[in-house]
Image (cartoon, grey):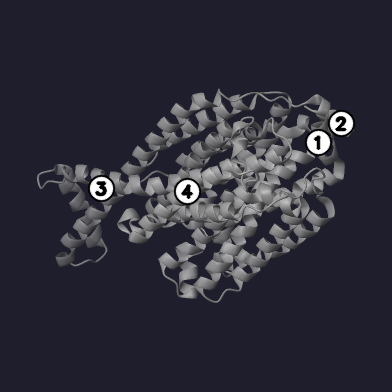
Amino acid sequence: MTQAAILEQDSLVEYGFRRAIITFTVVVCTLLEILDTTIVNVATNTLMGNLGATISEVSWVVAAYAIANIIVVPMSGWLSVQFGRKNYFAGSVALFTFASFMCGESTNIWMLIFWRFVQGVGGGALFATSQTILKEIYPPKKMGMAMAMFGMGVIVGPTVGPVLGGFLVDNYNWPIIFHVNVPIGIVAIFLTLRYIKDHPHHTKQTGKTDFLGILLLIIGVGSLQLVLEQGERNDWFESSYILEFFIVAIIGIVSFLIRELTIKNPIVDLRVMARGNTAIGSFLNFLLGFILFGTVFVFPIYFQGYLGFTAMQAGLMFTAGAIASACCMPFIGIMLTKGVPPKFLIMTGFAINAVFVFWSTTLLTTNTGPEAFFWPLLIRGIGTGLLFVPLSNLTLGGLHGRDIGQASGLSNMIRQLGGSISVALIGVMTERFSSQHRADILQNVTPDNPLLIERLKGFGAALSSSGTDSARIAKQGYALLNFGISKQAMILSYIEIFRYFVIVIVVSLPIVLLAKNYKPDPEAAGGGH
């Protein structure tokens, strides 16, 4: 490490009480940002009833936040330099807090959608900037512990969101899911202004601001996220609206890439991909988002649609795994501090997730009890814990200064895109696979099939005992049979999709070995004492 880099690291590292307060502040802000990506999902029916909205309109409450998030995240490194790290982080928390209040005060669905977009603009900075701040206030020899603290917020948020949202909506009213952010946000603003320092070696970029790059990023990435969020609800490319935005996304992204690679002072420095492990780390972040968001998308549908769980009960199924992940974090941080290469932990984490996904294919039935998922989801939590912290460590290893912010923003955006693409693909594959499985099942539905006759007799007996008249028994019996066939076809499609997930993980594992090992620099670590 150069002398300049050592001095830079030395001026940023915090110790004792200040470091504890800064860690607490940024982890809580990360938790709030991630929690708000999922907390709204359980309030869909309530919002439709209270605001007189359709399901299509309510879907924009989720989409608006995601679109704003994914636009701002890659720009967070540049914005942090332009406005100063402290001012940018505090301003983002303030914007997120104010928008949260206004979301709760919304009187119609489009007002809520607008403020959710503003909330996403504020929240987009919290995730990537929090990671950068933690990377800089800890000495290199304790970097594993820094990322462990960050990982706790990342993992707890998606698990707590549906549970907390379900509890608040069931016991209070929908505005509380937004207003709960306000007091926490106010405290976070105070702590940010009081304790977080500006980066002393970052100066505002001179020359013209790349407004064209900003515009192309908004058009390209924003349009792509819109397509991924709204495609399934609008029959994908059967809709001219989705097709048009897809074309705009392709043109915008290609133009953005050309622009950022050919100008001197880009908004998003894509050249950072050639430094350290940024490219490999970004690919692995995409894979993590693809697997994590995909499985989290399928299981709540399965729990609620086929096992009859409430939204809160479905969320609670993931609690044990989240606790396991959180408990693993300090130990993972210690292992990284002791010099265990992060790529070995990453390979173990992905391997455990592959085991979990394959195990799940043996459990997805129409009558599986909730207890059967306890150990698989617990093991998944451990595997996920082995991914977040080492992956952050690997991605940012060997980077210094503004490269950290740029790499953090890019890798986080790519992970979000991985999740969005996964959910979109699952929607397409589910429709296709379930149609095929339904056709296969119907080949066995013949009048001389003894199992079919027995099943219809069972339906008839159950309907008779409930007082249904004989004229309706046959009709309702066939309706129940049709529903059962559709349900079985859907579950078979999920099993097939999960098998493809296993293949993707296994094929991708060797890429981890290409990553370089960056050991903590003891010279820099000692400079702060």
The kind of residue tagged 3 is Ser
**Residue at the (54%, 50%) spot, across then down:** 316
337 lies left or right of 48: right
Q: Are marks 2 and 3 in contact (CB under 8 Å)?
A: no
The kind of residue tagged 4 is Ser
Dot 2, crowdedness within 10 Å: few (<14), some or many (≥20)? some
Q: Position of residue 189 (x, y in %)?
A: 76, 59
Numbered mark located on residue 420 in the image: 4
Q: Secondary structure at mark 3?
A: helix
The alpha-carbon separation of the residues under discs 1 and 3 comes to: 58 Å
Q: Which quadrant: the C terminus?
A: top right
Q: Earlier in the sequence, mark 2 or mark 3?
A: 3
Q: Which residue is mark 1?
A: 9
The kind of residue tagged 1 is Gln
Q: Are marks 2 and 1 in contact (CB under 8 Å)?
A: yes
Give the camera-side residue of 461 and 185. 185
Q: Earlier in the sequence, mark 1 or mark 3?
A: 1
User: For residue 450, which quarter of the picture?
Assistant: top left
Q: Position of residue 498 (x, y in %)?
A: 40, 38
Give the camera-side residue of 330 and 65. 65
Dot 4, crowdedness within 10 Å: few (<14), some or many (≥20)? many
Is residue 520 positioned above or below 261 on the image?
Answer: above
Q: Which residue is mark 3?
A: 435
The alpha-carbon separation of the residues under discs 4 and 3 comes to: 23 Å
Q: Which residue is mark 2?
A: 527
Q: Which quadrant: the N terminus?
A: top right
The alpha-carbon separation of the residues under discs 2 and 1 comes to: 8 Å
268 lies left or right of 292: right
